[in-house]
Image (tube, helix red, strand yellow):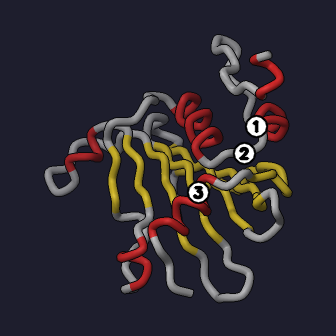
Amino acid sequence: MIFTDELILELISCDKIITDSPKKSPPMRGSEKKKFLLESLDGQHSFIGFISRNQTFQENFSIGLVYNPRDEKGKIVLLRVNGPHGLNENAPHHDGPHVHLATAERINVGLKPEGHIETDVPYETIEEAVQYFVKRINVVREDALKYFPPPNNQLDFIFDEDDLN
């Protein structure tokens, strides 16, 4: 399969349902992780979602969307929503929250897909990042509220068109 940036954006933004609820994995290398399965609303695409957080440094987290093509081997990380990993002169974006986004060029030449970095992101905490992730990848409202409800001190800003009328 040849990827285009348009296809990548479509895979990230298509409406998705959660087909297998988030489940904790045993802690590994100092991080706790939850995984869940998603499918595009049209049933054409399959995905894996994950939430990983360092047990010692709670601000060090990664929330990701992995594409699982049905007719090909392998999986492709499309998006990672990350917290700060600490100052690193070789990776200055690690000092604050940031997003890694896959690009067609990187996928098609066999590099780590998620090489494009966005640093102007609207979240600071893992709770805010989860809400950002769920909205960015378009998890349907019912599943978003069921599996990833907004923290108690936040309002739910996901509206259906009926809510606006």
Q: Nearer the viewer, residue 1 or 149?
A: 1
Eye-nearest disc, 1 or 3: 3
Can you say which quadrant of the picture contains the N terminus? bottom right
Q: Seen in the image, is 101 located left or right of residue 52?
A: left
Say the numbered circle drawn on residue 139. Answer: 2
Across and down, in percent, residue 64 comes to 56, 54
Q: Which mark is residue 12?
A: 3
Q: Secondary structure at mark 3?
A: helix
Q: Which of 13 and 36 lies nearest the eye of the viewer?
A: 13
Say which element carries label 1. helix
Mark 1 touches mark 3? (CB < 8 Å): no
Q: Calculate the distance from the C-alpha at mark 1 to the C-alpha at mark 3.
A: 15 Å
Measured Cα–Cα span from mark 2 to mark 1: 6 Å
Whole-percent x, y for residue 119 in the image: 32, 41
Counting residues from the N terminus, which is met first, the one under dot 2 or under dot 1?
A: 2
Give amino acid for label 2. Answer: Val
- For residue 46, above or below residue 137: below
Residue with the most extreme top position: 153
Q: CA distance from mark 3 to mark 2?
A: 10 Å
Q: Position of residue 152 (x, y in %)?
A: 70, 14
Q: Which residue is mark 1?
A: 144
Give whichever of discs 1 and 3 has the lower sequence position.
Answer: 3
* Residue shown at 73% from the left, 35% from the top: 148
> Dot 3: few (<14), some (14–19), or many (≥20) neighbours within 10 Å?
many
